[in-house]
Amino acid sequence: GRLGVLSSVQKHRGEGELLARFPECLALLEALPPREQMLVRNVLATIVEGQAWDLEYFAERSSVTCPEQLEHYAYMVAGCVGEFWTRLGLLVLGGAFSTQPEEVLLRWGVHYGMGLQLVNILRDREEDFSRGRSYLPGDDAEPWLEKAELWLKEGVFYAESLHNGRLRFSTVLPAWLGLDTLDLLKQREIPSSGKVKVTRGRVYSRMWKAFLFSWKEAL
């Protein structure tokens, strides 16, 4: 069928397998409880909307024009994921999910996802330029480096509030690695070809610290 053709032409092996097994994904979605299924459908719809906007917008333009545009895009493709996990965690675990109220968690979760997306945009800026597109309004990246750092720190606050150790580990690790990536971007005085990348040793160090962090009491 069409999925088989699409999976066979994918250069990325994982994406090809995902397409080939898409019917299994749909079956798993249908097996979820109704409220969880609704959350998954909503977040997927928002992400697809963001991806469609990206394709349509840059088909005619080379740069976003205002901060609000960038922030809305970052919400659609990443911030909504933080919102999704927050609502799912509260739905499944209730009061055992976090020490913080829902409105605080939703704000932190949305900003955390947007911060991770900003890191991707800042890290890939030169590559995107070469493709004739810019996700940053204007030439000054400094305000966005600061905003990304602020939002990722909210991600750390989010992780600190979680009761479950495994959730604390998996939530704090991307925030710390994102902050490390921002540090590398700030240190780079002259634009160079290729992306900045956190070293493998640094990743292992952060994983160990995240493991220790997972045993702490929620704040």
Image (spheres, rainbow, N blue to C red):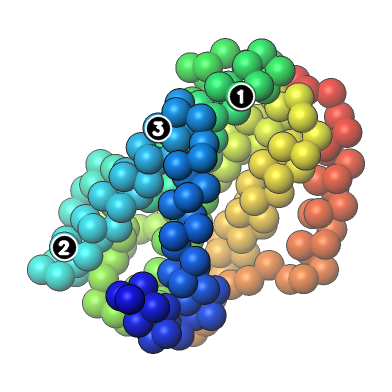
Residue holding disc 1: 92
Q: Residue at x 16, y 61 (%)?
A: 57
Q: Residue at x 88, y 33 (%)?
A: 215
- Residue type at the position of mark 3: Met
Quadrant location, the C terminus: top right
Q: Is residue 209 left or right of residue 133?
A: right
Q: Give the camera-side residue of 189 and 170.
A: 170
**Where 55 sits versus 153, above or below?**
below
* Neighbour tally class for label 2: few under 14, some 14-19, many 20 plus, Cα within 10 Å: few
Q: Earlier in the sequence, mark 3 or mark 2?
A: 3
Residue holding disc 2: 56
Residue holding disc 3: 38
Secondary structure under tag 1 reads: helix
**Where 17 sits versus 141, above or below?**
below
Q: Residue at x 52, y 36 (%)?
A: 32
Q: Earlier in the sequence, mark 1 or mark 2?
A: 2
Q: Give the camera-side residue of 92 and 132.
A: 92
- Observer able to see residue 72: yes
Secondary structure under tag 2 reads: helix
Quadrant location, the N terminus: bottom left
Q: Residue at x 89, y 41 (%)?
A: 212
How many numbered marks, from 0 up?
3
